[in-house]
Amino acid sequence: MGENAPHQDFRVGDVLRVSCPQTQGRVAEVSRFYASVEWPWAEIDPESQVRWNGRRAFAVSADSSEWTMSLFKTNPEPWNLHVGDSCLVGIPETLVRIIDIGRYDPPQDVGWLPRPHTMLVVVPADYPDEALSEDEGDTIDLDSAAPLTIELVSRS
């Protein structure tokens, strides 16, 4: 996160430019609703109470809010993936707005390493406030092993 603003400077309402270079992943499972990709960055936490399987699921419906809100995207799209396929996983340069910030001390036990200290809950920058519900948005783990680039664009 070389060019990033320090974690503690982020505030609810900030608009950020976020990206992550595409990295190769492998499709481990496909169901009616999800394509699961072996996550190329985080590793399973052997001390965790959470049994994470090392994968991230992507909604296979282009109309799903899970797909439209997800920062990470696959190439090809999840609805075109089959078990054993290689795909690229990354975040195309995206403008997002912070709607919540979670800070954890001790770091949160989520099943992978590194354990997150700070999680930003974000929505697309142009997403209307009145459309927000508690379950919407995606999270940015500021301690992520993924090579994220996060840049402060504007502060309200």
Image (cartoon, helix red, strand yellow):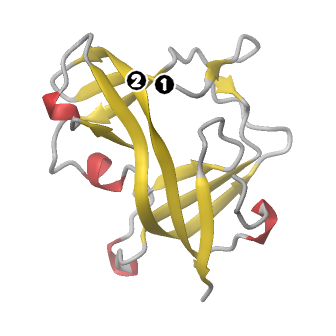
Residue 2 vs residue 32, the one in the foreground: 2
For label 1, the residue is 39
Decide if residue 116 is on the left or right side of residue 53: right
Q: Which residue is drawn at 68% across and 50% down?
A: 142
Q: Which residue is drawn at 59% across and 49% down?
A: 148
Vertical relation: 24 (above or below) 84: below
Vertical relation: 70 (above or below) 124: above
The answer to which image quadrant residue 155 occupies is bottom right
Decide if residue 113 is on the left or right side of residue 130: right
Circle 1 Cα neighbour tier, 10 Å, few/some/many (<14 / 14–19 / ≥20): many
Q: Which of marks 1 and 2 is nearer the N terminus?
A: 2
The answer to which image quadrant residue 149 occupies is bottom right
Q: Which residue is drawn at 15% across and 24% down?
A: 32
Give how far across and how far down residue 40 sits, in percent: 51, 25
Circle 2 Cα neighbour tier, 10 Å, few/some/many (<14 / 14–19 / ≥20): many
- Residue at the farthest bottom position: 156
Q: Mark 1 touching mark 2, by CB under 8 A?
A: yes
- Secondary element at tag 1: loop
Q: What is the spatial separation of the Cα atoms under label 1 and label 2, in whole angstroms?
A: 7 Å
Vertical relation: 39 (above or below) 135: above
- The three-letter amino acid code for the residue at tag 1 is Trp
- The three-letter amino acid code for the residue at tag 2 is Gly
The numbered mark at residue 25 is 2
> Marks 1 and 2: which is nearer the front?
2
Give how far across and how far down residue 45 sits, in percent: 69, 17
Residue 153 vs residue 13, the one in the foreground: 153
Q: Residue at x 71, y 17 (%)?
A: 48
The answer to which image quadrant residue 36 occupies is top left
Name the quadrant of the C terminus.
bottom right
The numbered mark at residue 141 is none
